[in-house]
Image (cartoon, helix red, strand yellow):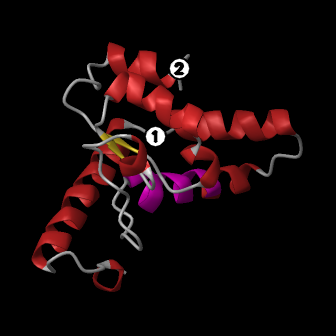
């Protein structure tokens, strides 16, 4: 995060005014990880256990629907792409992941973002309830 993600996010102007959404994976919830995020995003963190560490942050809601395009689209896309390539070594796996990520063009990214907006509308219209039964 410190050597690649944060510098790239800063270069793109995606730090000030933006929130960092942290998933609930245990390795992502350690004190060093939260401190690193806090150094860059301040208390603008959405994460399981973040409110214990940083007042003003937002706790990850339990059983929340997948709103993040990485959760509802990117990981599925990359998994399908990588399995199609059938890598046999770690190097081949990394190459397949890189190739899959590079294959994401502007149109594909735009559709994922529009789907995100659609999911947000469904959430608002359903007053915050789960939407997977509506979308699937």
Q: On the image, which quarter does residue 55 sit in?
A: top left
Q: Position of residue 112 (x, y in %)?
A: 33, 52
The label shown at residue 2 is 2
Task: Return the x and y of residue 74 as percentages of the image width and height.
Answer: 48, 51
Vertical order, 73 against 57 (above or below): below
Name the residue located 51 percent from the left edge and 57 percent from the top edge.
Answer: 24
User: Going 65% across and 40% down the picture, which residue do you hit?
Assistant: 97
Magenta extent: 69-79
Left or right of 110 in this view: 30: right
- Nearest to the observer: residue 118 or residue 49: 49
Secondary-structure class at tag 2:
loop
The dominant secondary structure in magenta is helix
Q: Residue at x 28, y 45 (%)?
A: 110
Labelled disc at residue 31: none
Q: Hey, which residue is sitting farthest left in the picture?
A: 125
Residue 91, image x, y percentages: 82, 32
Say whether residue 76 is left or right of residue 71: right
Q: Position of residue 23 (x, y in %)?
A: 48, 53
Q: Residue at x 88, y 46 (%)?
A: 88
User: Which residue does the numbered mark 1 point to in the structure image?
Assistant: 104
State whether residue 58 is above or below residue 41: below
The C terminus: image quadrant = bottom left
Looking at the image, residue 10 lies above or below residue 23: above
Task: Judge the density around disc 2: few (<14), some (14-19), many (≥20) Cα neighbours within 10 Å.
Answer: few
Could you tell me if the residues under marks 2 and 1 are in contact, i.e. CB atoms within 8 Å?
no
Q: Say which element carries label 1.
A: loop
Q: Quadrant of residue 125?
A: bottom left
Residue 76 colored in magenta in the image: yes
Q: Is residue 63 left or right of residue 79?
A: left
* Quarter occupied by residue 8: top left
- Marked residue nearer the N-terminal end (2 or 1): 2
């Amino acid at each position: 995060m410190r050597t690649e993600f944060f510098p790239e996010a800063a270069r793109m102007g995606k730090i000030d005014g933006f929130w960092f959404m942290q998933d609930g994976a245990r390795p992502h919830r350690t004190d060093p990880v939260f401190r690193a995020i806090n150094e860059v995003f301040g208390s603008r963190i959405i994460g399981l256990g973040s409110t214990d560490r940083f007042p003003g942050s937002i706790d990850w809601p339990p059983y929340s629907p997948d709103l993040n395009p990485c959760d509802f689209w990117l990981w599925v896309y990359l998994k399908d792409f990588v399995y199609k390539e059938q890598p046999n070594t770690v190097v081949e796996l990394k190459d397949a992941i890189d190739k899959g990520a590079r294959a994401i063009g502007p149109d594909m990214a735009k559709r994922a973002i529009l789907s995100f907006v659609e999911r947000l509308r469904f959430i608002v219209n359903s007053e915050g309830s789960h939407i997977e039964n509506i979308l699937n």
